[in-house]
Image (cartoon, rainbow, N blue to C red):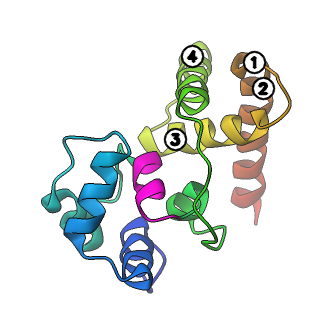
Amino acid sequence: MGVGETIGARAKSRRKKLGLRMTDVVKRVRDAGRSQTTIQNIRQLENEEVNKITYLAELSIALEADPIWLATGKKAPEKRPEINRKALGAAWDAARVIIDEHDLDFDHEDQMILALRIYFDLSGNGAKPQEVAKEALLQMLADRQSKSKS
């Protein structure tokens, strides 16, 4: 894998661009609400010893990076996203419910991507997470199907 193709590579690149030390990132992640994060967690991520994390929202806040870009590499890092933690939590719960309802074999990363799609689909439209979850899931599955055909 080349540079920037993993979440660890993107996190490390963004940290260095901001001129932060790993300890700075740990403090920022903790300040964002993930109090149990350690320097070892960040080191393992950056060294690509792990490729999935449970603190993506907090890490994206700490690195002032778009969470979708951080998770997938699909967007360039711009400015610190304004994240509504309550809405993100509701999107996460809606993703879990729809995954369970349809008995899908989604791993943690798939659930996070679905939750982020739900979260961003909710932004500014006043809908409830459950209302947009099915549409977000269908779009995600359609995207996967089109990728598998190419």
Figure quadrant of the C terminus: bottom right
**Label for residue 128?**
1
Q: Is residue 49 visible?
A: no
Under circle 2, the secondary element is helix
Marks 3/1: CA–CA distance: 18 Å
At 62% from the left and 49% from the top, the residue drawn is 82
Marks 1/2: CA–CA distance: 7 Å
Q: Nearer the viewer, mark 4 or mark 1?
A: 1
> Can you name the residue that lies furthest to the top here?
101
How many residues crowd mark 4 within 10 Å: few (<14), some (14–19), many (20+)?
A: some
Q: Quadrant of residue 40?
A: bottom left
Residue position for label 3:
112
Q: Nearer the viewer, residue 9 or 21?
A: 21
Q: Nearer the viewer, mark 4 or mark 2?
A: 2
Under circle 1, the secondary element is loop
**Label for residue 97?**
4
First to last magenta residue range? 56-64
Q: Amino acid at mark 2?
A: Val
Membership of 61 in magenta stretch = yes
